[in-house]
Amino acid sequence: MIVICHNISREKWKSFLNESPFSTPFQSPEYFNFYNSVTGLSAEAFAVEEKKELLTLCVVSYQKAIGGEI
């Protein structure tokens, strides 16, 4: 099952990152919350859960161009 953003259990999210040797700070709920708190920036989080366990998780970051053009 795919789980999106605020429906991802923070406990499972942090546990997944602590157990994975490949996790980065850019996958953390703290980064997700910080990025969403900055004007002009936003992030979405997606996870795959099976049997109540997170199998994978990614945070996708969006940035608006200043002035509307790049």
Image (cartoon, helix red, strand yellow):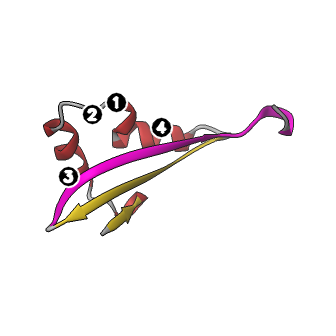
Return the residue at label 2: 23
Of the numbered discs 3 and 2, the one sitting upstream in the chain is 3
Of the numbered discs 3 and 1, the one sitting upstream in the chain is 3
Of the numbered discs 3 and 4, the one sitting upstream in the chain is 3
- Give the residue type that dot 3 points to: Glu
In which quarter of the view is residue 52 placed? bottom left
The residue drawn where x is 38% and y is 46% is: 58
- Give the residue type that dot 2 points to: Ser
Return the residue at label 1: 25
Say whether marks 1 and 2 touch (CB < 8 Å). no
Pick the residue in front: 57 or 30: 57
Number of numbered discs visible in the structure rendering: 4
Q: Secondary structure at mark 3?
A: helix
Above or below, 35 relative to 13: above
Of the numbered discs 1 and 4, the one sitting upstream in the chain is 1
Q: Which residues are magenta?
A: 52-68
The residue drawn where x is 40% and y is 33% is: 26
